[in-house]
Amino acid sequence: MAVNIFKKEDQAEGDFNNGEILEKKPIGFLQDGGKLKPYSNLFYWAHAWTPNNKSTIGLHPHKGFEICSFVIKGNINHFDTKQNKWIPLSKGDVQIIRSGNGISHAEEINYKSEIFQIWFDPNISKSLKKKATYDDYKSDDFKTVKLKNKKLKIIMGENSPMKMDTEGILINEYEVEKGKHSLKIYSGSIHSLFIIDGNLIYKKNILKKGTFLNASSQEKITFESINKSKIFEIISPLNPSYSTYS
């Protein structure tokens, strides 16, 4: 595997409440019909937004997986049966539900707000035997590093407060300036990238906002940013040490 590109039209679609919440799914469920299925210990990745009014995804259960929500724009409210109260989250905030032996939650996505909801597989043969736990993190909890022509926000990794059971996960967000850039690709890992804002050029391919790509088995990926852009990155093992659910 080198670099695989999945444009918005390649991704599965979904919606809630008759279109009040819309979704694109870079990594969908098997029945969703998108081109990309679960890999590494990434099981599901949805980009959800509210085009008109706020809307609520009602109380529903989870088991085994680590369910992470990343607020990309605006605000959401979250309820789960562990906290037993509604908790507000804003742009840049992150929540994690280690769903263990069972938990239910609900989400209200406010007007013109966007989130990623991503499911990680922490070896559910073990996690199903654990009690569910929950944490949320504010945007300011995460370290931001200023580099030559970009800013790096470390969401999961060195000195991050975020804790996960899933093996080998690193999560970053980059704000890149106009011009040429490269990102290192770690040996034995697969890098999953989502263009949150802006447009990139990779080997004469124009990658627009909403494009998803993954890369492995090479030293780096080099691209040009047409304008100031924002990129979300998850680094995960190419071959996890355990059998994943998928």
Image (cartoon, rainbow, N blue to C red):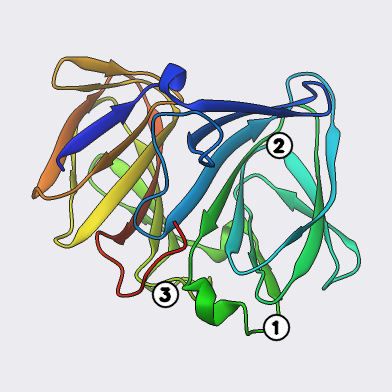
> Mark 3 packing: few (<14 Cα in 10 Å), some, or many (20+)?
few
Amino acid type, label 2: Gly
Mark before the other along the chain sequence, 2 or 1: 2
Q: Is residue 237 left or right of residue 36?
A: left
Image coordinates of residue 171 in percent, x first then y, are: 41, 57
Q: Nearer the viewer, residue 24 or 128?
A: 128
| Picture quadrant of residue 208 | top left
Image coordinates of residue 244 in percent, x first then y, are: 41, 65
Q: Is residue 191 left or right of residue 109?
A: left
Which one is closest to the eye, mark 1 or mark 3? 1
Residue displayed at 39% across by 53% down? 172
Amino acid type, label 1: Lys
> Mark 1 packing: few (<14 Cα in 10 Å), some, or many (20+)?
some
Q: Residue under label 2, please give it.
A: 74
- Image quarter of the C terminus: bottom left
Q: Residue under label 3, please give it.
A: 159
Q: What is the distance, in whole Å, between disc 1 and disc 3 at their CAs? A: 26 Å
Q: Is residue 201 above or below residue 115?
A: above
Image coordinates of residue 164 in percent, x first then y, are: 51, 73
Is the C-beta separation of discs 3 and 2 under 8 Å?
A: no
- Report helix, strand or loop for mark 3: loop
Label total for image: 3
Is the C-beta separation of discs 2 and 1 under 8 Å?
A: no
Q: What is the distance, in whole Å, between disc 2 and disc 1 at their CAs? A: 31 Å
Q: Is residue 135 above or below residue 227?
A: below
In the displayed orientation, state which residue is furthest to the front: 31
> Mark 2 packing: few (<14 Cα in 10 Å), some, or many (20+)?
some
Mark before the other along the chain sequence, 3 or 2: 2
Image coordinates of residue 54 in percent, x first then y, are: 84, 31
Q: Residue under label 1, please give it.
A: 131
- Report helix, strand or loop for mark 1: loop
